[in-house]
Amino acid sequence: MIIIHGMNDLHVLPRLLQRSLDLALRSFPIVVVTGSRQTGKSTLVHSLTNEPSRAYLTLDDLEVLDRARNAPEALVRSAGRMTLDEVQRSPDLLLAVKRAVDEEKAPGRFLLTGSANLLLMQRISETLAGRAAYLTLWPLTRREQLGAGTAGAWTRLLETGDDAAWKKLLEAESGEPEDWRALARRGGYPVPAHEMSDPEARALWFDGYTRTYLERDLQELSTVSSLVDFRRLMRAACLRLGNLVQQTELGRDVGLPQPTVHRHLSLLETSYQLVRIPAYAVNRTKRLLKTPKLYWCDTGLALHLAGETEPRGAHLENLILTDLLAWRDSQVPRPEILYWRTAAGEEVDFVIEWQGRLVPVEVKATQQPHLADARSLLAFRREYPDLSRPALLLHTGSETGWIAEGVLAAPWWRVI
């Protein structure tokens, strides 16, 4: 949940991840909630402090951080059930958590949060292997911002066995038309999304967020010799949303060697800023060899870092992706989100792989989609006729209808 403070009121927004969190706490001795800073992790886990015997400690508290670094065994044994917030600040604390769990594997014993992807930090993932469930809290989805506590209509579409019913299902969705550019500007971080309608105030918030990320979060992950170079790379990446990750080209543009670009991009991904989407291939090994596409965790922050004020079509793609990622990480088993590209130049923005079936999704920033906009979707369905469900062509207009056989054109706001 997220607590929103208004001028005269205070209300709680339910979070999509709550159900998965409840299930994980009933099933695993260690539950890890990660995500970029300011997505609402602390608020979500702090709501569990009313559980009997569950203590809440945050490593943002310097006294707690000192105990974590100098007396970790005593700290983890100070309560039967414990929430430890911002654990990436003291990775060695997890060794004490591991030893405590090996002695007693009670479900829900430790709830950990971090502003870094602990699965991508090798030493930490090896420490917790086989003992922990990992959950990711993304910025607020559009429907979470509206108070529904959900992501888009993805599950309802995929669980509908009758493909022909997709049009009627989306027409029945309760979403209202919205300016996608306004949504892209505010993004999904709770404070700028809900409390800052003034663009200058949002810019100040994003500037402070970036400064804290560079000066604290990043330094806790790895030593970066030049924050100026790192920020320049962040800007260049945000100007390339939806493009293939070409590290040599990116390095040439910002004046950095390819190994440095590779390392910096990995740090951005580990800290949930940059998102890389792999390519679809029937052979899963080949997916690892293909060049991924680049997006950002939050469109509002991406616009700020790039120095842009007017969202582009790539930002609409990014909005759809962030909803897909939040939905993906709330599902069991977890779907795959990929893209598709051929040597001939055919490309589909996103491919949802779920229970052995595929849904190609194309995003167009146009109010009146045409048959030509569905060309790549039709090519994908011809390539994988036995695996494909209907294709989705998401646009900025208001009409929902079959634009070609097996291709449903729908307003983006009816889906996310």
Image: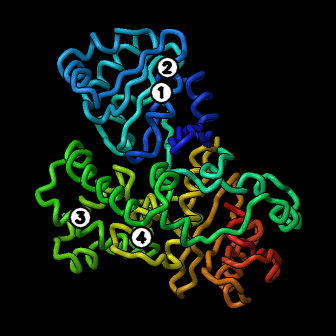
Q: Quadrant of the N terminus?
A: top right
* Amino acid type shown at disc 4: Thr
Quarter assignment of residue 208: bottom left
Q: Position of residue 98 (x, y in %)?
A: 36, 20
* Disc 1 to disc 4, C-alpha distance: 39 Å
- Identify which residue, 261 or 399, lies in the foreground: 399
- Disc 1 secondary structure class: helix
Q: Residue at x 22, y 18 (%)?
A: 67
Visible residue check, residue 307: yes
| CB contact under 8 Å: marks 2 and 1 | yes
Visible residue check, residue 286: no
Q: Which mark is residue 49?
A: 2
Q: Which mark is residue 46?
A: 1
Report the mark closest to the observer, 3 or 4: 3
Q: Position of residue 69 (x, y in %)?
A: 20, 23
Q: Position of residue 53 (x, y in %)?
A: 48, 9
According to the image, label 3 marks what residue? 231
Q: Earlier in the sequence, mark 3 or mark 2?
A: 2
- Disc 3 secondary structure class: helix
Q: Residue at x 44, y 58 (%)?
A: 297
- Identify which residue, 252 or 370, lies in the foreground: 370
* Disc 1 to disc 3, C-alpha distance: 32 Å
Q: Earlier in the sequence, mark 1 or mark 3?
A: 1
Answer left or right for 142 relative to 123: right
* Amino acid type shown at disc 1: His
**Outermost left residue:** 225
| CB contact under 8 Å: marks 1 and 4 | no
* Disc 4 to disc 2, C-alpha distance: 43 Å
- Disc 2 secondary structure class: helix
For mark 2, does the 10 Å Cα neighbourhood hold few (<14), some (14 to 19), or many (20 or more) residues? some
